[in-house]
Amino acid sequence: MADGKTGFLPKPVPHVWAPPVKCQGIKTKLVDFIGRNVAWNGGGRWVEPFLGSGVVLFNLCPERALVCDTNAHIIRFYQDIQSGVVTPRIVRDFLTENGAKLAQDGAGFFYAVRRQFNEEGGSLRFIFLNRSCFNGVMRFNSKGGFNVPFGHKPKRFSQAYVTKITNQVARAAEAMAGRDWVFKTQPWDTTLDACTEGDFVYLDPPYIGRHTDYYNQWTDEDAEALARVARSLRCGLALSMWKQNKYRENGHLGAHWAGYVLRTFSHFYHVGPTEDLRNPMTEVLAIRPGFETAAEPETRKRSTPGRAPRRTLLPVSAQLAFVLRDASRKLRGSSAAGRRTLAVSDTDAVLASDKAGSTKSSLGRRRR
């Protein structure tokens, strides 16, 4: 498709900023990867049926966008920022006042705010709970009630933390200003029905085969229906999905997204309460042919579940640089034996061999 080749995307996003809303599965680590792998002229609307935190939208900043979610609290929060109902100053004052009460009363105050939020709603209560609950998890019960427990940090809203959130709200308002962005609470299929040929659709649905109760249940049937409807569209399209982890691979991709261009990226998810539960994940960006950038090296090749994926070799010049670095460290008395990790690029993992011996140095990607 010729209209997918030049224009708004691709573009690098080297300095990604996080929006005020936190939720599991946030794509902060993948924004630059998405921006560099999609080709779209920007002539239509950027469409997201699964907005989530909004991190991709706010960092790519298209001129026109239709962004939706079934989570009415997220959509209302951003609508309130867009309309001026919620301003950085209002957020600062609310979090400062209620943060002081949280510091004094702890969990009791948190649960009082949670009860009030579940009865009456409110964007300010929403952001208060979102930033003081356990591990930044976004979760609702079958009745739509926010049910994440207290994060056990009574002094969560320090002056520095309130300033950080206030600045995120200010930056979100700045991103919206002068742009034609429409925020709607609606199901994904209603959003896709509104797409036209010049649009580009970015899909970030709940990940099939993984536990998720972010707001609505997401079943295999839902994922299959999404694939059918999305593939029938006549506009640009990209899907974020998990490809494999240390235990298994995602068979849904081959069954329902065959023929799409697959670009992979590996990183760590940080939702588990302890480091040993925070395992590496290989993500895939499935792009409609004609809307991808020039091919980049595969991040990781397919591997047997439970084994580390195979890795490609570093260029000779890079290997030499690491040899010189290690030699310098040895001279300073530091040990250079064993396995090391070093970030090389956003898309490549590498394996360099020591020609003088049998020891191999593992040069894996950095944890982002």
Image (cartoon, rainbow, N blue to C red):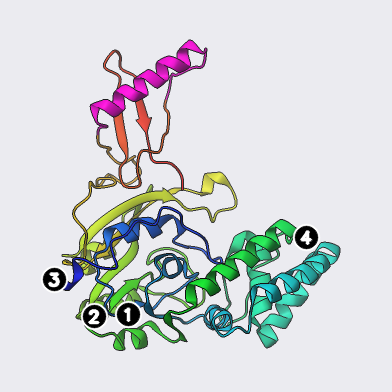
**Spatial CA span between label 1 and label 4:** 42 Å
Q: Is residue 263 left or right of residue 131?
A: left
Where is mark 2, residue-wise? 198
- Residue drawn at (25%, 85%) of the image: 196
Label located before the other in sequence (4 or 2): 4
Tell me the kind of residue under disc 2.
Gly
- Give the foreground label among 1 and 4: 1
Q: Which residues are magenta?
A: 313-338
Q: Residues within 10 Å of mark 2 (few under 14, many from 20)?
A: some
- In what element is the residue under mark 3? helix
Q: Is residue 90 above or below residue 149?
A: below
Q: Which residue is mark 4?
A: 154
**Label 2 to label 1: alpha-carbon separation:** 7 Å
> Furthest-left residue in view?
2
Q: In percent of the image, x 77 and y 68: which residue is there? A: 96
- Return the residue at label 3: 2
